[in-house]
Amino acid sequence: MITIESLRKYGANVDEGLQRCVSNEQLYLTLVNRFLDQNTFPDLKAAILDHDLEKAFHIAHSLKGVIGNLSLSPLYDVIYQLTELLRNRTEMDYSDYIQRYEMSYSLLAALR
Amino acid sequence: MNKNKRKILIVEDEFVNREILKNILLDDFEIFEAEDGETAVELLESKKSDLSLILLDLFLPKMSGLELLNIIQANPELNNIPVIVLTSDKELEVQCLQYGASDFISKPYPDSSIIKARINRVVELFEDRQTIKSTERDALTRLYTREYFYKYVADEDKTNPNAEKDAIAIGIRSFHIIKERFGTSISDSLLVRFSKRLKKLMPSISGMVCHLEADTFIVYAQHFEDYEDFIERLSQDLSLDNESKTPIKLQIGIYQNVDKNLDIDVRFERAKIALNKIRDSVVKNYFIFDDKLKEKELFEEELLEEFNAAINEKQFVVFYQPKFNIQGEAPKLASAEALVRWKHPQKGLISPGIFIPLFEEKGLIQQLDLYVWKEAASQMRKWQEKYHKHVPVSVNVSRIDLFDPTLVETLLDIVKENGLETKDLLLEITESACTEHVDVIIDKTNALRQAGFKIEIDDFGTGYSSLSMINKLPLDALKIDMIFTRNAFTSENDNKMIKIIIDIASYLKVPTIAEGVETKEQVAVLRELGCDIVQGYYFSKPVPNEEFAAFLTAEK
């Protein structure tokens, strides 16, 4: 089960995330779980592999907003860089970013 | 509390982001949500001006936030609702402001207190603007309110100083009955539809229109002659929104070729005076303000100016009309009614039929009522001292008096000062005073009765009060309006009305007092029907106090 403490250990900026939830711990944890449940990253990955960078950018942009609002710092760093690259439709090898994201994601999912 | 919450629409496709915003705002706002632009458009259509704010995410499926912002800005019913854009793109912020957004909130969201503060600030700014706008337009009909209308009339006069203009007052025939019979929602819907029609017609007469009050509208237009045609065009197929589609008749009063030296207020007052001449008439549908009405207006102006002097110089004289109990073997003096006359030093005796409605309208009636109460009380005392007779006197209590918080105290003081008892002073309240703000009237009448005063309901049967209201209203007597008495022998129907009123009174266990009794026959029939007390020329017209003394000495 994800707890405030385990999220803190994971590296999330829990204080900031809780601040946005007006200190409602229950809501914060529910939303983190919800984020894990509706994982849209596979769609982002597929779009990159399809070279549909436009679509990839849109998904990344939305993901960035959610991750940022939940202050999941390890994921935020990588999704932020990804979004900026995709914003400029940079044609490049994204596998390093994808790997980093997937790693951070599975670490978070492992807290469940 | 919940009902008064302001409404916010959150347009955001991400569940997590929506939940965070909802959690911040749910204490202060009622929240509506849309996951995409199309749902947002639907919601906006149904909520419209109910909304205090839209929070808009720029990245939306189906329709982008900017597209939605464009739709909102292009719709006059929506474009005054403030929009705060939610975005993580700095470069889009300026563009959003150009597109009409009021502010933006960046992502990741800042501190929740910052979000709250920004939202509240935008909502408040919006409401200040709304207040200005909404006072310009009547809330129900969306027509100009009087203040703004007068301003635009003044502007029009400045722009076209030589144009011949008419001031027109428009009313709906028997609107108060429509409201009474069919209820507020039907009568309001009529006003709304009628307003739209009026507005549409304005260009054809180069006019502008204002919803003055209830069913009264005023129009300032280029002078024209064909009023019949105007009424025809306005009322064509106009009907109530009920099952039988009751047709609606309009009436207008016109003050033609207005004198622009007159205050705007006075010009429309003249149109209203003309309208009032034919209000609820079945034969006439328009009336033009003429010299005769102008004379009347001047006469009334003089009366108003002379009111204070008349009070100070005691030009108002109280007459007394005896009321007799007819149920005994011989008629017995029961009480008297105090009736005011104006003995004007130059104009002679002025009928209360002229000055009472005028004083009621101009807010002077309270002063006159107080004068009469004091006069009647001091007269009663003199009679008691001189003839050792306790004859209660009834005085009129106007509707406006009932809203005076010091009424009970004032009356008690008068009674005390004259060494009387509260039961000596009978208070007549007209039935028509009891149709609105019923709770206040019932409370006040209760308080008066608790203080020991007796309440008589005047003109019973002519007002619009309901039986349930009469049942709730504490009272001590019902007065049958003289119209019913007068017609009692010419129309079977009105004889029935008297019976009905007597039945109601006996159900309420209170006596009835018939006014306007002129013949022996009428007395006999009323007695037969069970009426307790009568008043009228058969016994005596209202007389000055010296003459009334004869009734006191005649009684054993």
Image (spheres, coloured by chain):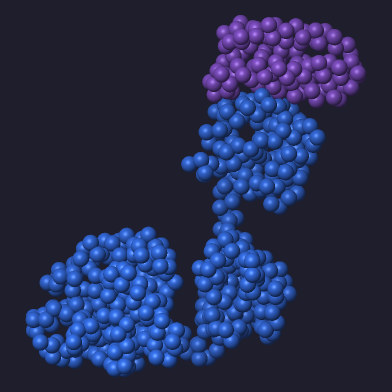
Chain colours: A purple, B blue
Quarter of the image for residue B208 reads: bottom right
Can residue B429 be seen by looking at this rendering? no
- Residue B12 image point, x, y percent: 70, 32
Q: In which quarter of the image is the C terminus of chain B?
A: bottom left
Identify the residue at image location x=8%, y=84%.
B386
Relative to residue B104, is residue B428 drawn left or right?
left
B197 is higher (above) or lower (below) than B112: below
- Residue B465 image point, x, y percent: 42, 69
- Residue A10 image point, x, y percent: 64, 7
B48 is higher (above) or lower (below) than B190: above
- Residue B463 image point, x, y percent: 42, 74
Identify the residue at image location x=66%, y=24%.
B16
Which residue occupies the foreground of this view, B206 or B65?
B65
Identify the residue at image location x=40%, y=72%.
B432
Identify the residue at image location x=53%, y=80%.
B279
Which residue occupies the foreground of this view, B256 or B201?
B201
Relative to residue B417, is residue B100 drawn left or right?
right
Can residue B524 be seen by looking at this rendering? yes
B390 is higher (above) or lower (below) than B106: below
Quarter of the image for residue B124 reads: top right
Quarter of the image for residue B528 reads: bottom left
B400 is higher (above) or lower (below) than B230: above
Q: Looking at the image, how many numbered discs can be counted on the residues?
A: 0
